Image (spheres, rainbow, N blue to C red):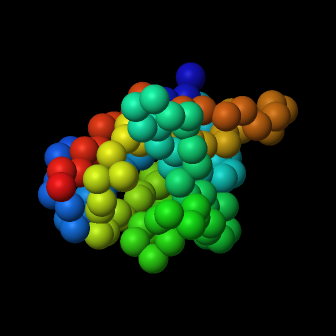
């Protein structure tokens, strides 16, 4: 059983900052890519940022220069530092990870339960 648990969401004023964390636990052989997605009301879930096991990162244009994704492989944790938050960043943010539970099993994709981020104007 693999669990992803997010924390760090909340209510913040426009221009403020939040730091999201996501811890992966359970039967883990290896973790490949880890990422953050978000889903605003009435919109589809979208990829915000992703980081590979080697630390390479990629972002959607809307958050470049404001958000930073990072990971601590020893702690099996991925972070999303969000600065200069704007009302359009309001969404439920989901953690995602590609996990192998053993040498003999191929990678599966796992999701956290989501954490609400609300930015007031």
Q: Quadrant of residue 49?
A: bottom right
Q: Quadrant of the N terminus?
A: top right
Q: Nearer the viewer, residue 16 or 30?
A: 16
Q: Is residue 27 above or below residue 50?
A: above
Instruction: Name the image quarter holding the C terminus.
Output: bottom left
Number of numbered discs overlaid on the protein picture: 0
Does residue 73 appear in the picture of this structure?
no
Depth order, front residue of 53/18: 18
The location of residue 8, given as percent across then percent down, is 26, 48
Q: What is the residue that sits farthest to the top in this orientation? A: 1
The answer to whether residue 109 is visible is yes
Q: Residue at x 45, y 52 (%)?
A: 77
Instruction: Please name the residue shown 42% across and 58% down the image.
Output: 79
Q: Is residue 27 above or below residue 15?
A: above
For image coordinates 50% across by 34% down, the residue present is 43
Tell me residue 28's x, y (percent). Answer: 61, 38
Q: Is residue 65 left or right of residue 88?
A: right
**Displayed quadrant of residue 52:** bottom right
Q: Position of residue 109 (x, y in %)?
A: 67, 34
Q: Is residue 47 above or below residue 92?
A: below
Q: Position of residue 33 (x, y in %)?
A: 66, 53
Q: Is residue 59 left or right of residue 76?
A: right
Answer left or right for 40 relative to 18: right
């Amino acid at each position: 059983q693999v669990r992803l648990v997010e924390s760090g969401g909340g209510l913040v004023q426009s221009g403020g900052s939040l730091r999201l964390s996501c811890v992966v636990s359970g039967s883990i052989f290896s973790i490949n890519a880890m990422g953050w997605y978000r889903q605003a009301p009435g919109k589809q879930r979208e990829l915000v940022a992703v980081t590979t096991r080697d630390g390479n990162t990629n972002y959607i244009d809307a958050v470049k220069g404001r958000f930073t994704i990072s990971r601590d492989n020893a702690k099996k944790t991925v972070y999303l530092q969000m600065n200069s938050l704007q009302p359009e960043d309001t969404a439920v943010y989901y953690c995602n990870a590609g996990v192998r539970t053993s040498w003999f099993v191929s990678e599966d994709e796992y999701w956290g339960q989501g954490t609400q981020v609300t930015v007031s104007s």
